[in-house]
Amino acid sequence: MNAARQNRFNTIAAHGALILYTLIALFPVFVIVINSFKTRKAIFREPLALPSADSFSLIGYETVLKQGDFFLYFQNSMIVTIGSLFFILLFGAMAAFALAEYRFKGNTVMGLYLALGIMIPIRIGTVAILEMMVQTGLVNTLWALILVYTAQGLPLAVFILSEFMRQVSDDLKNAGRIDGLSEYRIFFSLVLPLVRPAMATVAVFNMIPIWNDLWFPLILAPAEEVKTLTLGSQVFIGQFVTDWNAVLSALSLAILPVMTLYVIFSRQLIRGITSGAVK
Amino acid sequence: MTALTLTNVCKSFGTVEVLKDIKLTVEDGEFVVFVGPSGCGKSTLLRVIAGLEDATSGTVDIGGTVVNHIPPAKRGIAMVFQSYALYPHLTVRDNMALGLKQEKQPKTVIDERVGKAVEMLDLGAYVDRRPSDLSGGQRQRVAIGRAIVREPKLFLFDEPLSNLDAALRMNTRIEIAELHRTLSASMIYVTHDQTEAMTLADKIVVLRDGQVEQVGSPMELYNNPANQFVAGFLGSPAMNFLHKAPLAIPKNGALGIRPEYLRVQKDGRIKGTVTHVERLGGDTNLLVSTAEQENLTVRIFGQDSTQVGECIQLDFDDQQSFAFDEHRQRIPA
């Protein structure tokens, strides 16, 4: 910021607001993490206290890890999330490229049709989806989840990416055509690297709802060997007894991978935002 | 041999006709410039020649082969774009080599041709850099290099100098002219800048609204424009058109006089007041409002002391004026 335009009061106010928001946003996460390291009694006695020598306990983590299948759940969630993101980005970008690049009859109608999914929640079709999955024998497979999440993520992906694809220089694509590159090479090696920030945005938007989803895993893939992490954590929540240590530990562990993914994508995101402004 | 023949080329986008019945020949080794105001279809015509757009009807013939159904890469052309359009992820050398690699040329041929182009364009110090590390002028030279290594039958330039600043534009213009002399290749060059058109072209094609207005050498068009549009488009400052008496003016037509053919003269036929003076050092432009409320530009060579508000009289030689009829066509003298 320019020193001449800097105003001490404004700076402090801005930082104050940001710090306050950060605290509010991080507070629930903080409570989950500290309580996951405490004994059951300590959790209820003083939920906001930090773990002390007395109250420190790893019992929750032990329960979770002993539960045995926890790593499997973890792996299932990872496969579903990454698989879905891969297909959303691949097919979303391809459809967006076609819509942005080629003139054909019904281009606009097709674009609107693909964007329609943004307005209609996919859960409305749950019964039909379940019937389809039963008929195709995909119930209790990870493919069922990957396919549903891909369908769920595509409309927004196409919508955002086609807008960015339009901004990629026509000259560049034409230079590729004159040099004899195929349309696939033009798409993968010229256009995709230039819309990377938009891809990261789409990935972040889609990643967290998929990772946290309970609805479709519960309906389409409740079997033990295909349970996702969110569904798996439900075993600790009972109608009468809830193993809070285990629940909090499982949730703390579940934060880690999604945070790692977020860090990877958000670097692209920030680079995308600043590259236009600073260059 | 002819490098390019266009026969009745038409192009429409939906119901909008962008190119109307274009007929044109480019001889081997000729430097042809398409010039016209923006939206006249000159870039579209270039893209049709390149194969980036399909002609709605008519044939495009490059070096004796009809190429209507041949993809751009196999037409024997190379193109230089206004925005350079370098591949951002490749080094200068790889940018130049990509087209040849796609043609499956042996590595020795690629190295030799890229080496020659690098030397010709003085890019030796930059071959391993990425386009983002180069200045605008250097990027455009790389883009030209990428075209040279293909050894095309026909070079296509799409307003290559529009993104460069004035000094660089002149240098690059001279480089392109030299390039044309060394390679003696056929080139088509699209621009809206008439200076580029006049200085580079063997043959200028003036386009308007998707139609060819006139084709000829720069001096032919300057001295002998076919219609009022061509007369007004070429020359800077632009030609003056008088529509009102006291002179002999064709009915509903116009009389065109180039600014440099007007002279200040005591008993001149045109009376007017100076409304503005542009002193350029080498010459002086007077903007004059005539007694009939028409605006004229007078170009005086050297420096001149005329002041704004002065009443002056102007005259010209009749054989240096151009008469146009009511359809804006030239009336032969």
Image (spheres, coloured by chain):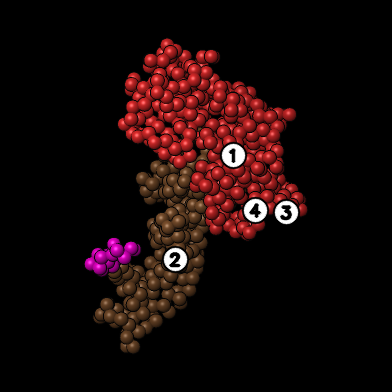
Chain colours: A brown, B red
* Closer mark to the observer between disc 4 and disc 2: 4
Real-space Cα separation, disc 4 to disc 3, in angstroms: 16 Å
Q: Please give the residue where the numbered disc 4 appears in the rendered image.
A: B122
Q: Is residue B248 magenta?
A: no
- Same chain for mark 4 and mark 2? The answer is no
Circles 2 and 1 on the same subunit: no
Residue occupied by mark 3: B111
Q: Secondary structure at mark 3?
A: helix
Question: Residue A179 location, x and y as percent?
Answer: 64, 44
The image quarter containing residue B50 is top right
x, y percentage for residue A47? 27, 77
**Mark 3 or 2: the one toward you:** 3
B265 versus B177 height, above or below: above
4 or 3: tag closer to the N-terminus: 3
Q: Which residues are magenta?
A: A1-18
Locate the C terminus of chain A and report the quarter of the image it occupies: bottom left
**Chain name for mark 3:** B
Q: Amino acid at mark 2?
A: Val
Q: Residues within 10 Å of mark 2 (few under 14, many from 20)?
A: few
Residue position for label 1: B157
Real-space Cα separation, disc 2 to disc 1, in angstroms: 44 Å
